[in-house]
């Protein structure tokens, strides 16, 4: 599976690392215990604050977590174009 994804112009990173590896505005699919504990979905805000988006529910497969992120992105309003 690819490590970097984009959906509707928003970046998604699959990583075994932590959310601190994400750039502001990116979504992350994070491996828990190397993936053995499941996968978590997070978003890093513009100020560097990280929010877990799956309410402590962990996904068994990274593909399931990625599909969840894409569904969330589809519910969000489109990003404003850069000035």
Image: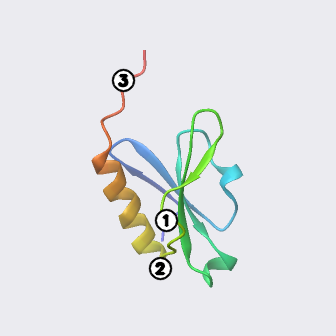
Circle 3 sits in a helix, a strand or a loop, which is it?
loop
Query: On the rendered structure, is 61 left or right of 8?
Result: right
| Residue under label 2 | 61
Q: Quadrant of the C terminus?
A: top left
* Relative side of 11 to 81, left or right: right
The residue positioned 66% from the left and 39% from the top of the image is: 48
Q: Which SS class for mark 2?
A: loop
Please give the count of numbered marks on the rendered protein: 3
- Residue contact at pointers 2 and 1, CB within 8 angstroms: no
Q: Is residue 22 above or below residue 17?
A: above
- Where does residue 22 sit, x and y in percent of width and height? 63, 48
Above/below status of 1 relative to 53: below
Residue mark closest to the camera, 2 vs 1: 2
Q: Residues within 10 Å of mark 3 (few under 14, many from 20)?
A: few
Residue of label 3: 81
Residue 40: where, in percent of width, then height?
55, 67
Secondary element type, mark 1:
loop
> Residue 28: x and y, percent?
54, 56
Residue 1, image x and y in percent?
A: 48, 71
Looking at the image, the residue that sits furthest to the bottom is 36
Asked if the residue at tag 3 contacts the one at tag 2, i.e. Cβ–Cβ closer than 8 Å, the answer is no
Q: Which residue is situated farthest in the top direction here? A: 83
Q: Which of pointers 2 and 1 lies earlier in the amino acid sequence?
A: 1
Task: Indicate whether 72 appears above or below 56.
Answer: above
Q: Residues within 10 Å of mark 1 (few under 14, many from 20)?
A: few
State the image quarter where residue 35 is shown.
bottom right
Residue at image x 48%, y 76%? 59
How far apart are the two marked residues, 2 and 1, measured between alpha carbons? 14 Å
The residue positioned 42% from the left and 44% from the top of the image is: 10
Could you tell me how far apart the alpha carbons at marks 1 and 3 are, in whole angstroms? Answer: 27 Å
Q: Which residue corresponds to mark 1? A: 2
């Amino acid at each position: 599976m690819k490590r970097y994804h984009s959906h509707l112009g928003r970046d998604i990173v699959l990583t075994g690392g932590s959310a601190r590896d994400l750039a502001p505005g990116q979504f992350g699919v994070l491996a828990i215990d190397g993936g053995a504990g499941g996968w978590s979905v997070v978003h890093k805000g513009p100020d560097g604050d990280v929010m877990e988006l799956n309410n402590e529910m962990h996904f068994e497969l990274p593909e399931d977590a990625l599909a969840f992120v894409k569904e969330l992105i589809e519910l969000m309003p489109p990003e404003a174009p850069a000035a």
